[in-house]
Image (cartoon, grey):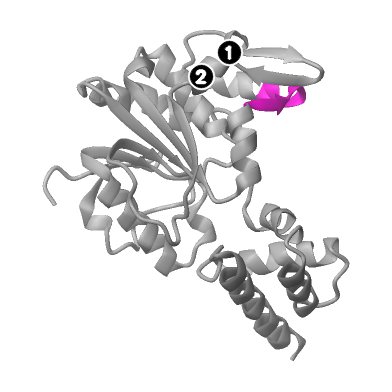
Amino acid sequence: MADKTDDIELRLLLEAIFRKYHYDFRGYSMASVKRRLTQARDHFGCSTFSQLQDRVLHDSSVLPELLSYLTVQVSELFRDPDYFRAIREQVVPHLRTYPSLKVWVAGCSAGEELYSMAILFREEGLEEKTLFYGTDINPDALKRAEAGVYPLERIPLFTENHRKSGGKSSLSDYYTAAYGAAVFDKSLRQRAVFSDHSLVSDAVFAEVQLISCRNVLIYFDLGIQDRAVGLFSDSLVRKGFLGLGAKESLRFSRHSESFVEFSRDEKIYQKRGTV
């Protein structure tokens, strides 16, 4: 009975967040949302989701912190190096044929994946003709992405990932270490646009050649996953590329026929030439 009451209160909380602040988590995987909001409930010292709802409705300062629980901010530079090696060795030769390029990193979190792409594109001589879009629904994450500052203790992992991805230079060429942090070169983001965008409710905003959206779909239910994949299909040029996370797939999407598997192991898909 307690679980059922929890679930009712949880859904009312999500409805309240949507109606008051227009952040829509109603289509997220309930198991994941419940786990993260339970942590948030304990953090705010509330004994029920209804108490947390009261806090978020009457104190707007609660929302930013609550968003940090609802939007997962876990990434690293060149995370899953084999994925970036596949982009470098298999996708880049196709991208070279375009006179200009647009790359969309959807759910960019604190920017690690976008900086990885910017470094990779610089090393492959594509940076100058590329515009990068980094989008997320979490304003704090976007601020951190624009700042490009990461704790120095994460650099050894970033460096190893970069090397394994086929990096053609030293990662230290791209950042300055100071006061326990690594500040990435601002030239890496001079062709980047960071913007608020929701895969749950927003529309297509650009035509792009490559979309990288990794470890985001796993937090959506099937309906929202399908919406997001449709958005990706509408955003990509014909024969454009879509990269997903290791545990994600287009297999159950009604838009799957719009794509062919380009790299099965690295979950990279190519939009069909005719759809």
For residue 188, the mark is: 2
| Residue at left offset 14%, top offset 52% | 275
Horizontal side, residue 26 vs residue 232: left or right: right
Q: Looking at numbered disc 1 in the image, what kind of residue is underneath it?
A: Tyr
Q: Is residue 42 above or below residue 158?
A: below
Q: Looking at numbered disc 2 in the image, what kind of residue is underneath it?
A: Leu
Q: CA distance from mark 2 to mark 1?
A: 8 Å
Horizontal side, residue 58 vs residue 103: left or right: right
Q: Position of residue 84 (x, y in %)?
A: 45, 28
Residue that numbered label 1 is attached to: 174
Q: Which residues are magenta?
A: 148-157
Specify few, some or many for label 1: CA neighbours under 10 Å numbering under 14, 14-19, or 20 or more. some
| Residue at left offset 85%, top offset 75% | 47
Residue found at the far left of this picture: 274
Residue contact between numbered discs 2 and 1, judged by CB atoms under 8 Å: yes
Residue found at the far bottom of this picture: 1
- Looking at marks 2 and 1 on the same chain, the residue that comes earlier in the sequence is marked by 1
